[in-house]
Image (tube, helix red, strand yellow):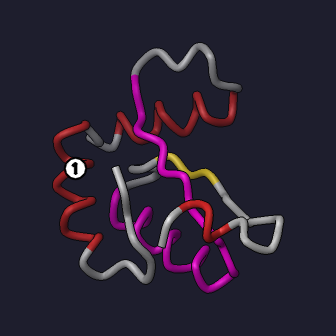
Amino acid sequence: MIIADAFKDGKAFMPFITCGDPNLDITEEIIYALDEAGASLIELGIPFSDPTAEGPVIQSASERALQAGTTLTRYLIWLKRSGRKCPFPLRL
């Protein structure tokens, strides 16, 4: 699947979630729920410590994810593991 495939009918449901909010195990469950709800694509945000360009909701999600111990390294390890079970392709 390529991104253009998701828009073949003109519109796509593409939710955004911050990985690790509230933790990586729940993130994985959210991905499966979004897939069941009909998501065409899912944008996975990597939390960072100074998300000033983001609004308050994503800022708070990043803070919670970082407090839960989500780091880029842990995210990439999780992505590699979860990608094998994910119902659609995961791309970096």
Question: In which image quadrant can residue 78 be found?
Answer: bottom left
Kindly indicate the quadrant of the structure image that contains residue 42: bottom right
Residue 26 sits inside the magenta stretch: yes
Q: Residues within 10 Å of mark 1 (few under 14, many from 20)?
A: few
Residue at figure coordinates x 24%, y 78% from the top left: 84
What x and y, as percent, mark residue 23? 37, 55
Q: Is residue 57 left or right of residue 83?
A: right
- The amino acid at mark 1 is Leu
As helix, strand or loop, the secondary structure at mark 1 comes to helix
In front of the other: 12 or 19: 12
Name the residue at 74% across, 65% down. Answer: 13
Locate residue 33, reporting x and y percent: 57, 79
Q: Nearer the viewer, residue 60 or 44?
A: 44
Residue found at x 33% / y 44%:
68
46 within the magenta span:
yes
In this figure, which residue is indicated by the disc labeled 1? 76
Looking at this view, name the residue that lies furthest to the right. 10
Name which residue lies at 50% across and 79% down.
32
Span highlighted in magenta in the image: 24-48
The vertical placement of 47 against 52, above or below, is: below
Image spot of residue 51 (x, y percent): 53, 20
